[in-house]
Image (cartoon, rainbow, N blue to C red):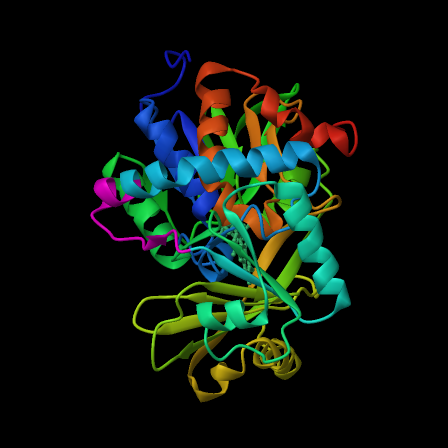
Amino acid sequence: MSLETLDSRHPDAVVVGGGLIGSSIALRLAQAGLRVSVLDRGPAGQEASSAAAGMIAPQAEKMGPAKFGELCGLSHSLYPEFAAEVEALSGHVVNYRRDGTLLVALDDEQVREIDDIEADAASPAIERLDSQAAQRRVPGLASDIRSALFLAGDHWVDNERLTRAVIEAARRQGVTFQENTPVRRIHVRHERMEGAETDRERIACGEVILAAGCWSGTLAATAGVELPMEPCRGQMLEFELDSPLPVVVRGGHSYLVPRDGNRVVVGTTAEYAGFDAAVTAGGIAEVLRAALRLAPFLAGGCFRRAWAGLRPDTADHLPILGPCGISGLTLATGHFRNGILLAPVTARLIADIVVNKSSPPVLESFAAERFAPVA
Ligand SMILES: Cc1cc2nc3c(=O)[nH]c(=O)nc-3n(C[C@H](O)[C@H](O)[C@H](O)COP(=O)(O)OP(=O)(O)OC[C@H]3O[C@@H](n4cnc5c(N)ncnc54)[C@H](O)[C@@H]3O)c2cc1C
Protein backbone atom coordinates (compact mmCIF):
# COMPACT_ATOMS: atom_id res chain seq x y z
CA MET A 1 0.00 0.00 0.00
CA SER A 2 1.10 3.58 -0.53
CA LEU A 3 2.10 5.21 2.71
CA GLU A 4 3.74 8.33 1.33
CA THR A 5 0.67 10.49 1.74
CA LEU A 6 0.40 9.73 5.45
CA ASP A 7 1.92 11.85 8.15
CA SER A 8 4.57 9.86 10.01
CA ARG A 9 2.75 10.44 13.33
CA HIS A 10 -0.26 8.63 11.97
CA PRO A 11 -0.72 4.91 11.92
CA ASP A 12 -1.24 3.21 8.59
CA ALA A 13 -4.11 1.24 10.08
CA VAL A 14 -6.40 1.70 13.07
CA VAL A 15 -8.12 -1.39 14.42
CA VAL A 16 -11.23 -0.49 16.40
CA GLY A 17 -11.65 -3.12 19.12
CA GLY A 18 -8.90 -5.03 20.90
CA GLY A 19 -10.68 -8.36 21.37
CA LEU A 20 -9.24 -11.55 19.95
CA ILE A 21 -10.42 -10.65 16.46
CA GLY A 22 -9.03 -7.10 16.39
CA SER A 23 -5.77 -8.03 18.13
CA SER A 24 -5.15 -10.99 15.81
CA ILE A 25 -5.69 -8.76 12.79
CA ALA A 26 -3.39 -6.11 14.28
CA LEU A 27 -0.70 -8.74 14.76
CA ARG A 28 -0.91 -9.83 11.12
CA LEU A 29 -0.89 -6.23 9.84
CA ALA A 30 2.16 -5.38 11.92
CA GLN A 31 3.93 -8.49 10.62
CA ALA A 32 3.20 -7.20 7.11
CA GLY A 33 5.08 -3.99 7.98
CA LEU A 34 2.23 -1.58 8.77
CA ARG A 35 2.17 0.85 11.68
CA VAL A 36 -0.91 -0.25 13.61
CA SER A 37 -2.92 1.25 16.48
CA VAL A 38 -5.61 -0.68 18.27
CA LEU A 39 -8.19 1.52 20.00
CA ASP A 40 -10.31 -0.07 22.69
CA ARG A 41 -12.93 1.61 24.82
CA GLY A 42 -11.84 -0.48 27.83
CA PRO A 43 -8.90 -2.69 28.62
CA ALA A 44 -8.22 -4.76 25.49
CA GLY A 45 -9.44 -8.34 25.43
CA GLN A 46 -11.91 -8.15 28.31
CA GLU A 47 -15.21 -8.67 26.51
CA ALA A 48 -16.54 -11.71 24.57
CA SER A 49 -13.04 -12.97 23.82
CA SER A 50 -12.33 -13.53 27.50
CA ALA A 51 -15.88 -14.59 28.37
CA ALA A 52 -15.96 -17.49 25.89
CA ALA A 53 -15.55 -21.19 26.56
CA GLY A 54 -12.73 -21.59 24.04
CA MET A 55 -14.11 -24.50 22.04
CA ILE A 56 -12.57 -24.88 18.60
CA ALA A 57 -15.34 -27.10 17.46
CA PRO A 58 -16.35 -27.03 13.82
CA GLN A 59 -17.97 -30.45 14.12
CA ALA A 60 -19.91 -30.22 17.37
CA GLU A 61 -21.37 -26.84 16.40
CA LYS A 62 -23.94 -27.09 13.66
CA MET A 63 -22.03 -25.08 11.15
CA GLY A 64 -24.80 -23.76 8.90
CA PRO A 65 -24.19 -23.09 5.20
CA ALA A 66 -21.39 -24.92 3.37
CA LYS A 67 -19.38 -21.70 2.93
CA PHE A 68 -19.42 -21.18 6.68
CA GLY A 69 -18.30 -24.76 7.26
CA GLU A 70 -15.44 -24.11 4.84
CA LEU A 71 -14.39 -20.98 6.73
CA CYS A 72 -14.53 -22.81 10.07
CA GLY A 73 -12.60 -25.77 8.67
CA LEU A 74 -9.92 -23.47 7.35
CA SER A 75 -9.53 -21.72 10.69
CA HIS A 76 -9.49 -25.03 12.55
CA SER A 77 -6.64 -26.20 10.33
CA LEU A 78 -4.68 -23.00 11.03
CA TYR A 79 -4.99 -23.34 14.82
CA PRO A 80 -1.97 -25.50 15.69
CA GLU A 81 0.38 -23.13 13.88
CA PHE A 82 -1.42 -20.01 15.13
CA ALA A 83 -1.29 -21.13 18.78
CA ALA A 84 2.39 -22.11 18.52
CA GLU A 85 3.31 -18.84 16.81
CA VAL A 86 1.45 -16.73 19.37
CA GLU A 87 3.13 -18.62 22.22
CA ALA A 88 6.56 -18.08 20.66
CA LEU A 89 5.97 -14.37 19.97
CA SER A 90 4.39 -13.55 23.33
CA GLY A 91 6.23 -15.88 25.69
CA HIS A 92 2.81 -16.94 27.09
CA VAL A 93 1.34 -20.44 27.19
CA VAL A 94 -2.18 -20.55 25.72
CA ASN A 95 -3.17 -24.14 26.51
CA TYR A 96 -4.28 -25.24 23.08
CA ARG A 97 -5.54 -28.79 23.58
CA ARG A 98 -6.48 -31.45 21.06
CA ASP A 99 -8.13 -33.98 23.38
CA GLY A 100 -11.46 -34.06 21.53
CA THR A 101 -15.09 -33.53 22.44
CA LEU A 102 -17.67 -35.96 23.77
CA LEU A 103 -21.07 -35.03 22.37
CA VAL A 104 -23.84 -36.60 24.41
CA ALA A 105 -27.52 -37.13 23.55
CA LEU A 106 -30.04 -37.34 26.39
CA ASP A 107 -33.30 -37.17 24.44
CA ASP A 108 -34.75 -37.87 20.98
CA GLU A 109 -33.96 -34.43 19.63
CA GLN A 110 -30.33 -34.66 20.71
CA VAL A 111 -30.05 -38.14 19.20
CA ARG A 112 -31.28 -36.69 15.88
CA GLU A 113 -28.70 -33.90 16.17
CA ILE A 114 -25.79 -36.26 16.66
CA ASP A 115 -27.14 -38.51 13.88
CA ASP A 116 -27.00 -35.47 11.57
CA ILE A 117 -23.49 -34.55 12.66
CA GLU A 118 -22.30 -38.11 12.14
CA ALA A 119 -23.93 -38.28 8.69
CA ASP A 120 -22.58 -34.87 7.60
CA ALA A 121 -19.06 -35.31 8.85
CA ALA A 122 -18.10 -38.67 7.30
CA SER A 123 -14.81 -38.32 9.14
CA PRO A 124 -12.74 -41.17 10.58
CA ALA A 125 -12.10 -38.91 13.57
CA ILE A 126 -15.74 -39.46 14.65
CA GLU A 127 -16.63 -42.40 16.84
CA ARG A 128 -20.16 -43.48 17.85
CA LEU A 129 -20.38 -44.55 21.48
CA ASP A 130 -23.08 -46.21 23.54
CA SER A 131 -23.84 -45.09 27.08
CA GLN A 132 -21.27 -47.37 28.70
CA ALA A 133 -18.50 -46.36 26.34
CA ALA A 134 -19.33 -42.69 26.94
CA GLN A 135 -19.19 -43.31 30.71
CA ARG A 136 -15.77 -44.88 30.31
CA ARG A 137 -14.51 -41.76 28.53
CA VAL A 138 -15.91 -39.45 31.20
CA PRO A 139 -16.92 -41.22 34.43
CA GLY A 140 -19.87 -39.72 36.29
CA LEU A 141 -21.93 -38.58 33.31
CA ALA A 142 -25.72 -38.98 33.33
CA SER A 143 -26.68 -42.66 33.61
CA ASP A 144 -29.41 -42.39 30.96
CA ILE A 145 -27.27 -41.25 28.03
CA ARG A 146 -29.03 -42.38 24.85
CA SER A 147 -26.02 -42.17 22.56
CA ALA A 148 -22.79 -40.21 22.10
CA LEU A 149 -20.21 -39.17 19.55
CA PHE A 150 -16.55 -38.71 20.23
CA LEU A 151 -15.16 -35.98 17.99
CA ALA A 152 -11.40 -36.28 18.06
CA GLY A 153 -10.98 -33.24 15.78
CA ASP A 154 -12.78 -30.74 18.02
CA HIS A 155 -10.30 -28.93 20.22
CA TRP A 156 -10.21 -26.20 22.87
CA VAL A 157 -7.98 -23.36 23.96
CA ASP A 158 -7.90 -21.25 27.09
CA ASN A 159 -9.34 -18.20 25.34
CA GLU A 160 -8.43 -15.81 28.18
CA ARG A 161 -4.81 -16.85 27.93
CA LEU A 162 -4.93 -16.80 24.13
CA THR A 163 -6.39 -13.31 24.00
CA ARG A 164 -3.77 -11.97 26.43
CA ALA A 165 -1.04 -13.70 24.45
CA VAL A 166 -2.19 -12.32 21.10
CA ILE A 167 -2.26 -8.80 22.58
CA GLU A 168 1.25 -9.27 23.94
CA ALA A 169 2.46 -10.76 20.64
CA ALA A 170 0.99 -7.81 18.75
CA ARG A 171 2.64 -5.34 21.17
CA ARG A 172 5.99 -7.02 20.66
CA GLN A 173 5.49 -6.64 16.90
CA GLY A 174 5.11 -2.90 17.40
CA VAL A 175 1.31 -2.52 17.62
CA THR A 176 0.21 0.36 19.86
CA PHE A 177 -2.77 -0.35 22.09
CA GLN A 178 -4.69 2.74 23.19
CA GLU A 179 -6.98 1.44 25.94
CA ASN A 180 -9.85 3.25 27.63
CA THR A 181 -10.20 5.12 24.35
CA PRO A 182 -13.65 4.68 22.86
CA VAL A 183 -14.03 5.45 19.20
CA ARG A 184 -17.06 7.68 18.77
CA ARG A 185 -17.16 7.98 15.03
CA ILE A 186 -15.65 6.78 11.79
CA HIS A 187 -15.25 9.68 9.39
CA VAL A 188 -16.25 9.19 5.78
CA ARG A 189 -16.17 11.70 2.94
CA HIS A 190 -17.11 10.95 -0.64
CA GLU A 191 -17.26 7.21 0.18
CA ARG A 192 -13.69 7.29 1.47
CA MET A 193 -12.85 6.56 5.12
CA GLU A 194 -10.76 9.42 6.54
CA GLY A 195 -10.10 8.41 10.12
CA ALA A 196 -11.44 7.49 13.54
CA GLU A 197 -12.57 10.00 16.15
CA THR A 198 -12.13 9.52 19.89
CA ASP A 199 -13.03 11.91 22.72
CA ARG A 200 -9.52 13.38 22.50
CA GLU A 201 -8.59 13.43 18.84
CA ARG A 202 -9.30 12.57 15.29
CA ILE A 203 -6.85 9.98 14.02
CA ALA A 204 -6.21 10.15 10.31
CA CYS A 205 -5.21 6.86 8.76
CA GLY A 206 -5.37 4.98 5.49
CA GLU A 207 -7.27 2.00 6.84
CA VAL A 208 -9.77 1.36 9.61
CA ILE A 209 -10.66 -2.20 10.51
CA LEU A 210 -13.86 -2.37 12.52
CA ALA A 211 -13.60 -5.26 14.98
CA ALA A 212 -15.63 -3.95 17.90
CA GLY A 213 -17.58 -7.16 18.55
CA CYS A 214 -21.26 -6.60 19.29
CA TRP A 215 -20.69 -2.82 19.38
CA SER A 216 -19.67 -2.78 15.71
CA GLY A 217 -23.16 -1.98 14.45
CA THR A 218 -23.33 1.32 16.32
CA LEU A 219 -19.93 2.37 15.01
CA ALA A 220 -20.61 1.26 11.44
CA ALA A 221 -23.74 3.43 11.48
CA THR A 222 -21.55 6.50 12.05
CA ALA A 223 -19.97 5.70 8.67
CA GLY A 224 -23.37 5.23 7.05
CA VAL A 225 -23.17 1.43 7.02
CA GLU A 226 -26.14 -0.42 8.48
CA LEU A 227 -25.22 -3.75 10.08
CA PRO A 228 -28.06 -5.83 11.52
CA MET A 229 -26.31 -6.87 14.72
CA GLU A 230 -27.51 -7.74 18.19
CA PRO A 231 -25.69 -8.83 21.33
CA CYS A 232 -26.49 -12.34 22.54
CA ARG A 233 -25.63 -12.78 26.21
CA GLY A 234 -24.03 -15.97 27.45
CA GLN A 235 -23.66 -16.65 31.18
CA MET A 236 -20.87 -18.89 32.38
CA LEU A 237 -19.77 -20.58 35.61
CA GLU A 238 -16.45 -21.99 36.71
CA PHE A 239 -15.83 -24.84 39.16
CA GLU A 240 -12.86 -26.69 40.55
CA LEU A 241 -13.13 -30.47 40.40
CA ASP A 242 -11.19 -33.14 42.30
CA SER A 243 -9.57 -34.34 39.09
CA PRO A 244 -9.20 -32.94 35.58
CA LEU A 245 -12.02 -33.25 33.08
CA PRO A 246 -10.36 -35.26 30.27
CA VAL A 247 -12.31 -33.85 27.30
CA VAL A 248 -14.94 -31.27 26.44
CA VAL A 249 -18.43 -32.62 27.19
CA ARG A 250 -21.45 -31.22 25.34
CA GLY A 251 -25.13 -32.07 25.36
CA GLY A 252 -27.83 -29.84 23.88
CA HIS A 253 -26.98 -26.25 24.84
CA SER A 254 -24.93 -27.32 27.83
CA TYR A 255 -21.19 -27.86 27.94
CA LEU A 256 -18.26 -28.36 30.25
CA VAL A 257 -14.83 -27.30 29.01
CA PRO A 258 -11.62 -28.19 30.86
CA ARG A 259 -9.09 -25.68 32.11
CA ASP A 260 -5.78 -26.26 33.82
CA GLY A 261 -5.64 -26.97 37.54
CA ASN A 262 -8.79 -29.19 37.57
CA ARG A 263 -10.92 -26.20 36.66
CA VAL A 264 -13.90 -26.50 34.37
CA VAL A 265 -15.98 -23.80 32.70
CA VAL A 266 -19.66 -24.50 32.33
CA GLY A 267 -22.08 -22.83 29.94
CA THR A 268 -24.31 -21.31 28.84
CA THR A 269 -27.34 -19.19 28.07
CA ALA A 270 -28.32 -17.46 24.81
CA GLU A 271 -30.25 -14.32 25.78
CA TYR A 272 -31.16 -11.26 23.77
CA ALA A 273 -31.11 -8.75 26.63
CA GLY A 274 -29.48 -5.76 24.95
CA PHE A 275 -25.99 -4.66 25.95
CA ASP A 276 -26.44 -5.83 29.54
CA ALA A 277 -23.71 -8.30 30.55
CA ALA A 278 -25.18 -8.99 33.99
CA VAL A 279 -25.05 -12.39 35.64
CA THR A 280 -28.58 -13.21 36.77
CA ALA A 281 -30.05 -15.70 39.22
CA GLY A 282 -32.16 -17.14 36.42
CA GLY A 283 -29.13 -17.49 34.17
CA ILE A 284 -27.07 -19.26 36.81
CA ALA A 285 -29.99 -21.61 37.55
CA GLU A 286 -30.45 -22.41 33.85
CA VAL A 287 -26.78 -23.17 33.27
CA LEU A 288 -26.49 -25.28 36.42
CA ARG A 289 -29.70 -27.23 35.86
CA ALA A 290 -28.63 -28.31 32.37
CA ALA A 291 -25.03 -29.04 33.36
CA LEU A 292 -26.01 -31.18 36.36
CA ARG A 293 -28.44 -33.11 34.19
CA LEU A 294 -25.61 -33.83 31.72
CA ALA A 295 -22.80 -34.32 34.23
CA PRO A 296 -24.04 -35.12 37.77
CA PHE A 297 -20.39 -35.35 38.93
CA LEU A 298 -20.32 -31.55 38.76
CA ALA A 299 -22.34 -31.45 42.02
CA GLY A 300 -19.12 -32.02 43.97
CA GLY A 301 -17.28 -29.18 42.23
CA CYS A 302 -16.27 -26.06 44.16
CA PHE A 303 -17.76 -22.86 42.75
CA ARG A 304 -15.10 -20.34 41.67
CA ARG A 305 -16.79 -17.58 39.69
CA ALA A 306 -19.57 -16.56 37.31
CA TRP A 307 -19.53 -14.10 34.41
CA ALA A 308 -21.36 -13.15 31.26
CA GLY A 309 -20.28 -12.07 27.79
CA LEU A 310 -21.99 -10.61 24.75
CA ARG A 311 -21.69 -12.58 21.50
CA PRO A 312 -21.72 -10.41 18.39
CA ASP A 313 -24.73 -11.89 16.60
CA THR A 314 -26.01 -10.90 13.15
CA ALA A 315 -29.36 -11.27 11.39
CA ASP A 316 -28.27 -14.55 9.75
CA HIS A 317 -25.86 -15.54 12.55
CA LEU A 318 -22.91 -15.42 10.15
CA PRO A 319 -19.89 -13.11 10.40
CA ILE A 320 -19.50 -9.87 8.47
CA LEU A 321 -16.08 -9.77 6.87
CA GLY A 322 -14.33 -7.65 4.29
CA PRO A 323 -14.93 -4.37 2.46
CA CYS A 324 -18.23 -2.54 2.83
CA GLY A 325 -18.35 -0.14 -0.12
CA ILE A 326 -16.42 2.58 1.71
CA SER A 327 -12.83 2.73 0.61
CA GLY A 328 -10.44 2.22 3.55
CA LEU A 329 -13.04 0.68 5.87
CA THR A 330 -12.92 -3.09 6.39
CA LEU A 331 -15.29 -5.06 8.62
CA ALA A 332 -14.30 -7.97 10.83
CA THR A 333 -17.21 -8.63 13.11
CA GLY A 334 -20.32 -10.69 13.83
CA HIS A 335 -18.49 -13.87 14.81
CA PHE A 336 -21.35 -14.81 17.16
CA ARG A 337 -20.60 -18.23 18.74
CA ASN A 338 -17.43 -18.91 16.79
CA GLY A 339 -15.03 -16.02 17.16
CA ILE A 340 -12.41 -18.01 19.03
CA LEU A 341 -12.46 -20.69 16.35
CA LEU A 342 -12.47 -18.10 13.55
CA ALA A 343 -9.70 -15.78 14.81
CA PRO A 344 -6.81 -17.28 12.79
CA VAL A 345 -8.61 -17.29 9.45
CA THR A 346 -10.17 -13.87 10.04
CA ALA A 347 -6.78 -12.34 10.84
CA ARG A 348 -5.14 -13.88 7.82
CA LEU A 349 -7.87 -12.93 5.31
CA ILE A 350 -8.53 -9.44 6.62
CA ALA A 351 -4.80 -8.64 6.62
CA ASP A 352 -4.64 -9.92 3.05
CA ILE A 353 -7.50 -7.62 2.04
CA VAL A 354 -5.96 -4.57 3.74
CA VAL A 355 -2.36 -5.13 2.65
CA ASN A 356 -2.78 -6.68 -0.80
CA LYS A 357 -6.24 -5.35 -1.72
CA SER A 358 -7.18 -8.94 -2.45
CA SER A 359 -10.72 -10.38 -2.53
CA PRO A 360 -10.49 -13.88 -1.06
CA PRO A 361 -13.29 -15.95 -2.67
CA VAL A 362 -13.98 -17.71 0.63
CA LEU A 363 -15.22 -14.38 2.03
CA GLU A 364 -17.77 -13.65 -0.70
CA SER A 365 -20.67 -15.02 1.35
CA PHE A 366 -19.80 -12.86 4.35
CA ALA A 367 -19.90 -9.37 2.83
CA ALA A 368 -22.02 -6.69 4.53
CA GLU A 369 -23.81 -6.11 1.22
CA ARG A 370 -25.76 -9.33 1.71
CA PHE A 371 -28.03 -7.47 4.14
CA ALA A 372 -28.64 -4.18 2.39
CA PRO A 373 -26.94 -1.75 0.06
CA VAL A 374 -24.55 0.60 1.82
CA ALA A 375 -26.32 3.90 2.49
C1 LIG B 1 -20.42 -17.14 26.83
C2 LIG B 1 -19.72 -17.21 25.51
C3 LIG B 1 -19.16 -18.41 25.10
C4 LIG B 1 -18.50 -18.48 23.86
N1 LIG B 1 -17.87 -19.64 23.53
C5 LIG B 1 -17.19 -19.71 22.36
C6 LIG B 1 -16.48 -20.88 22.01
O1 LIG B 1 -16.46 -21.84 22.78
N2 LIG B 1 -15.84 -20.91 20.81
C7 LIG B 1 -15.84 -19.86 19.95
O2 LIG B 1 -15.26 -19.96 18.86
N3 LIG B 1 -16.47 -18.70 20.28
C8 LIG B 1 -17.16 -18.60 21.45
N4 LIG B 1 -17.82 -17.46 21.79
C9 LIG B 1 -17.85 -16.36 20.82
C10 LIG B 1 -16.60 -15.51 20.87
O3 LIG B 1 -16.28 -15.21 22.20
C11 LIG B 1 -16.80 -14.22 20.07
O4 LIG B 1 -17.31 -14.50 18.79
C12 LIG B 1 -15.47 -13.48 19.92
O5 LIG B 1 -14.83 -13.34 21.17
C13 LIG B 1 -15.67 -12.12 19.30
O6 LIG B 1 -14.45 -11.45 19.37
P1 LIG B 1 -14.34 -9.90 19.06
O7 LIG B 1 -12.93 -9.53 19.19
O8 LIG B 1 -15.05 -9.63 17.78
O9 LIG B 1 -15.26 -9.23 20.18
P2 LIG B 1 -14.90 -8.80 21.68
O10 LIG B 1 -14.03 -9.78 22.35
O11 LIG B 1 -16.21 -8.48 22.33
O12 LIG B 1 -14.06 -7.50 21.49
C14 LIG B 1 -14.62 -6.32 21.02
C15 LIG B 1 -13.79 -5.18 21.58
O13 LIG B 1 -14.25 -3.95 21.02
C16 LIG B 1 -14.17 -2.97 22.02
N5 LIG B 1 -15.05 -1.85 21.68
C17 LIG B 1 -16.40 -1.82 21.69
N6 LIG B 1 -16.86 -0.60 21.34
C18 LIG B 1 -15.76 0.15 21.09
C19 LIG B 1 -15.56 1.51 20.70
N7 LIG B 1 -16.59 2.34 20.50
N8 LIG B 1 -14.29 1.96 20.55
C20 LIG B 1 -13.23 1.14 20.77
N9 LIG B 1 -13.37 -0.15 21.16
C21 LIG B 1 -14.61 -0.64 21.30
C22 LIG B 1 -14.59 -3.70 23.28
O14 LIG B 1 -14.16 -3.01 24.45
C23 LIG B 1 -13.92 -5.05 23.09
O15 LIG B 1 -12.64 -5.10 23.69
C24 LIG B 1 -18.44 -17.34 23.02
C25 LIG B 1 -18.99 -16.14 23.46
C26 LIG B 1 -19.61 -16.06 24.68
C27 LIG B 1 -20.16 -14.73 25.16
Pinpoint residue 56: horizontal percent, then vertical percent. Answer: 48, 49
State the residue at coordinates (50%, 46%).
Answer: 125
Quarter in which the C terminus is drawn: top right
Task: Give the percent coordinates (x, y) of residue 101.
Answer: 49, 58
In this view, the residue in front, 362 or 43, is 362
| Magenta stretch encompasses residue 91 | yes
Q: Is residue 18 visible?
A: no
Seen at 69% across and 66% down, the residue is 271
Rendered residue at 67%/29% (across/down): 367
- Occupied quadrant, residue 188: top right
Residue at the far right in the pictured view: 372
Residue 232 position (above or below residue 364):
below
Query: In the rendered image, which quarter contains the N terminus?
Result: top left
Kindly identify the residue that appears in the image at 57 percent across and 64 percent down.
Answer: 250
Whole-percent x, y for residue 176 in the image? 32, 39
Q: Is residue 148 visible?
A: yes
| 298 part of magenta stretch | no
Q: Is residue 177 above or below residue 325?
A: below
Q: 130 above or below 125?
A: below
Name the spot of residue 218 as percent of width and height, x first.
65, 46
Q: Which residues are magenta?
A: 86-99
